[in-house]
Image (cartoon, grey):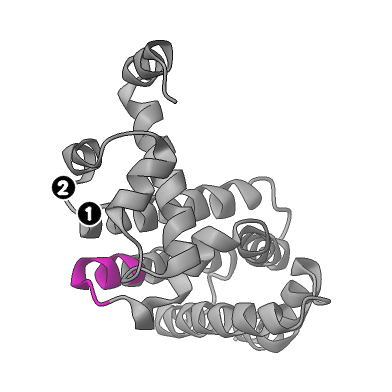
């Protein structure tokens, strides 16, 4: 039974902390049940708040889903940007960025599950948010490669970034079926496939 003290503690939680708590729980429920089967009632119950409070923060179940995906996008960007700081070569920069991606999906399977299962998502704004994550990662890779490989045609860099992002998604799904493949091994496999061609073009 909920006590008055418990209720008071919930009410005193800072808004940002409460929002983060709601997103974390919603992420769990969406990952477990899928978007369509997930209910705001269950999410509210797990958080320990009323359903109207969820609507106050996010407006709708759609808004809550988009909030979860946006949170995953922010965390993935931060992880990849931090990973390449201090890279001592173009090859190492790309390697560290790819490794950060594979580590993120290995350590944050719930977050990645929201990004991966877009086929089951019928909410257009959520689909657009997922595509924005792809664009984000593509732009990051283009930026890294443009700084590191100035001799390569920008169009080739853009194409290479699109190939890398698509390859990361497919390889990540393959890794789910191959739990023995570590993030380091996945990174090595992808680097072997793409780096030789990119580095050879830099000298043209």
Extreme residue toward the front, this view = 1
**Percent x, y of residue 17:** 40, 28
**Percent x, y of residue 72:** 45, 54
* Residue at 33%, 72% in the rendered image: 131
Q: Is residue 60 magenta?
A: no
Q: Is residue 129 magenta?
A: yes
**Percent x, y of residue 167:** 57, 84
Residue at the disc numbered 1: 63
Crowding near the residue tagged with mark 2, few <14, some 14–19, many ≥20 C-alpha atoms within 10 Å: few
Who is closer to the viewer here, 14 or 73?
A: 14
**Percent x, y of residue 43:** 37, 49
* Residue at 83%, 76% in the rendered image: 180
Residue at the disc numbered 2: 59
Who is closer to the viewer here, 137 or 103?
A: 103
Who is closer to the viewer here, 186 or 6?
A: 6
Q: Quadrant of residue 27?
A: bottom left
Describe the element under mark 2 as helix, strand or loop: loop
20 above or below 67?
A: above
Q: Start and end of the magenta stretch? A: 122-130
The answer to whether mark 1 and mark 2 are in CB contact below 8 A is: yes
Describe the element under mark 1 as helix, strand or loop: helix
Q: How many marks?
A: 2
| Residue 119 seen anywhere in this rendered image of the structure | yes
196 above or below 109?
A: below
Q: Quadrant of residue 138?
A: bottom left
């Amino acid at each position: 039974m909920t006590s008055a003290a418990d209720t008071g503690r919930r009410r005193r939680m800072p808004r940002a902390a409460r929002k983060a708590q709601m997103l974390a729980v919603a992420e769990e429920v969406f990952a477990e049940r899928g978007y369509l089967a997930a209910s705001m009632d269950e999410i509210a119950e797990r958080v320990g708040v009323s359903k109207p409070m969820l609507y106050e923060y996010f407006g709708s179940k759609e808004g809550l889903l988009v909030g979860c995906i946006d949170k995953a996008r922010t965390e993935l960007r931060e992880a990849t940007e931090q990973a390449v700081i201090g890279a001592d070569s173009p090859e190492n920069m790309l390697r560290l960025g790819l490794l950060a991606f594979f580590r993120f999906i290995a350590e944050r399977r719930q977050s990645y599950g929201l990004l991966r299962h877009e086929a089951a998502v019928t909410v257009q704004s959520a689909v657009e948010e997922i595509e924005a994550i792809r664009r984000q990662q593509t732009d990051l890779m283009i930026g890294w490669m443009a700084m590191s490989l100035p001799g390569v045609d920008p169009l080739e860099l853009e194409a290479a970034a699109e190939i890398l992002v698509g390859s990361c998604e497919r390889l990540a799904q393959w890794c789910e079926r191959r739990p023995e493949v570590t993030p380091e091994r996945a990174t090595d496999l992808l680097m072997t496939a793409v780096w030789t061609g990119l580095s050879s073009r830099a000298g043209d």
